[in-house]
Image (cartoon, rainbow, N blue to C red):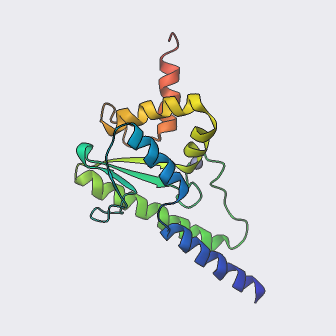
Amino acid sequence: MKKAKKISLTRSQNMARIKSKNTKPEIYIRKLLYKMGYRYRVNYSQLPGTPDIFILKYNTAIFVNGCFWHRHKNCKIATFPKTHTEYWEKKFRRNVERDIEVREKLFEMDISVITIWECEINKMRQNEEYRGKYLKILRDRIERVFNYEEEDISVQMEVAEKSTPYK
Ligand SMILES: [Zn+2]
């Protein structure tokens, strides 16, 4: 009995978290984008998936994703709960499938999709050098200098560092 109660409470808290808008990481990114000169809509419900940020000028949708809920690959935050595994498996699968569906719909509309992960934001907050490099690639992605649609920005950063050893 007690356990069941605990789950439903957690679940409703989860729902609240998923639905809540203007979460802090989003605001952090928005402020940076604004400083970089971009103008955008937030929680743009006219597009599939209601992108957290939509930059009309570049037809670019940005999602600020929690690593746990959206199952960020190879990420320490994306742990797997040890209890109620079936429930979590289903829930995670649904989230991931929904993300893929949304991305495909946006691609079909020629909208570029960028995912910014919670762990990347945490790192940006702590590490100025990382932030500088991250924002550089983010800018290239927004303005479609690069077209690595599927890759995380932090993955691209690693690739960029390896390919320019004489900098
Ligand atoms: Zn992560």
User: Which image quarter holds the N terminus?
Assistant: bottom right
Tell me, yes or no, if residue 90 can be seen here: no
Toward the right, the furthest residue is 2
Tell me, yes or no, if residue 38 can be seen here: yes
Percent from the top left, x then y, of residue 55?
Answer: 30, 48
Q: Is residue 13 left or right of residue 21?
A: right
Q: Is residue 70 left or right of residue 81?
A: left
Toward the top, the furthest residue is 166
**Viewer-proximal residue, 136 or 157?**
136
**Image: 14 above or below 164:** below
Residue drawn where x is 48% and y is 70% of the image: 19
Residue drawn where x is 54% and y is 55% of the image: 24
**Viewer-proximal residue, 1 or 30?**
30
Q: Is residue 163 left or right of residue 3?
A: left
Percent from the top left, x then y, of residue 96?
Answer: 47, 61
Residue drawn where x is 57% and y is 28% of the image: 129
Q: Is residue 34 left or right of residue 17?
A: left
Residue drawn where x is 54% and y is 65% of the image: 92
Percent from the top left, x then y, of residue 31?
Answer: 45, 46
Tell me where residue 43 sits by quadrant: bottom left
How many discs mark residues in the rendered view?
0
**Image: 164 above or below 103:** above
